[in-house]
Amino acid sequence: MKHLIDPTDLTKEETEEIIDLALDIIDHPENYAEACKGKKLATLFYEPSTRTRLSFTAAMMELGGNVLGFSDAQNSSVSKGETCADTTKVINCFADIIAMRHFEEGAALVSAMNSRIPVINAGDGSHAHPTQTLTDLLTIKREIGRFDNLTIGFCGDLKFGRTVHSLIKALSRYEGVKVVLIAPEQLRLPDYMKKEVCDVNGIPYKEVTTLEEVMPELDVLYMTRVQKERFFDEDEFDRVKDCFILDSEKLSTAKPGMRILHPLPRVNEITVDVDADPRAAYFRQVENGKNVRKALILKLLEWADKKDRETTLVPADAVRNQHVCRNPRCISNMEVNVDSLFRPATDHPGEWRCVYCESKAKN
């Protein structure tokens, strides 16, 4: 079975197949109006969402399929204590494909482990958001025209920003990509991402503390909001929430062809005067999200029973129930009957990383 839990579940070639299909859907929407006739998508959203949930719904409807599911887990049997695994087994009786958004990191992986239909991770806590990554890639392709030889700046919450983590992983497969990390000390990109993704793939990166010092060199500026819901300490959130605000003045030194992306929602990190700038691509990005999700749905349904397209859910070198994850939001700490799974940490020999959320094991 082919699932999409992490951007690296798709090969570079599979990713480009999806992007190319999305481009064809944009050019010839009439050819796909009944492509999913008789098929049902289940949208299981345990966490608030506007763009992702509605784009999945719109995508399936425009493909001629049907949609069922929930946008508030408290209106489902989850409120009675049903586990993610059991919910998945139930939904398998009603749908052909699942899109899941969950606040527990690793929930989509657990769902895939218990599913006989494709599962799409629509965001699991601060861990990964691979369909946003496909949206970002399609936007970059349409706006810039290439993935190679890009300098991309990630600004804001790089610690908890699942969209940032996912996009860096995807771009690490391309030649000539340079990454600029713009964040305060408290929200820097995790060390394991720098070592396991950037260093391993030879992606040069630098860390800075102001937008102004790097603006002239960027081809893409990826803005993010500081996510209050990821903080345990509200005082810490208040200290960093207004660290970076992009306005028209800061864009004065940017390249004419530079593009601004944002996964949205924004709070105050991009002022509204930027919206009229042709370099602001974040609302065009939303439309791209619908079309790339159409392509993803079609491809996963096409690949569902192909043995050469199976997703490796558990690494071959993983160990089971030998360690405890230090992340309180990890599904292995939040739900019963979820085995702990750990793989060797390549950035720290002798240590272990959780398969569900990539956090380290407790000592």
Image (spheres, rainbow, N blue to C red):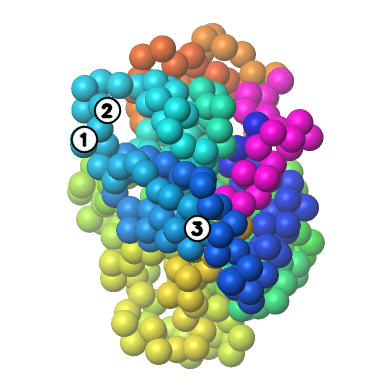
Residue at numbered disc 3: 64
- Kind of residue at badge 1: Gln
Residue sitting at x 49%, y 88%: 278
Residue sitting at x 69%, y 33%: 305
| Callout 1 crowding tier (Cα within 10 Å): few <14, some 14–19, many ≥20 | few
Which quadrant is home to the N terminus?
top right
Residue at numbered disc 1: 74
Left-right relation of 55 to 230: right
User: From what the image shows, is residue 314 above or below residue 151?
Assistant: above
| Callout 2 crowding tier (Cα within 10 Å): few <14, some 14–19, many ≥20 | some
Q: Secondary structure at mark 1?
A: helix
Residue 207 visible within the image: no
Residue at numbered disc 2: 78
Residue 321 in picture, x, y percent from top left: 52, 9
The magenta segment is 297-316
| Callout 3 crowding tier (Cα within 10 Å): few <14, some 14–19, many ≥20 | some
Q: Secondary structure at mark 2?
A: helix
Seen from the viewer's position, the closer of residues 324 and 253 is 324
- Kind of residue at badge 2: Val
Residue sitting at x 43%, y 50%: 66
- Mark nearer the N terminus (1 vs 3): 3
User: From what the image shows, is residue 84 above or below residue 260?
Assistant: above
- Kind of residue at badge 3: Gly
Seen from the viewer's position, the closer of residues 91 and 346 is 91
Residue sitting at x 53%, y 52%: 37
Whether pointer 2 and pointer 3 mark residues with C-beta atoms closer than 8 Å, the reply is: no
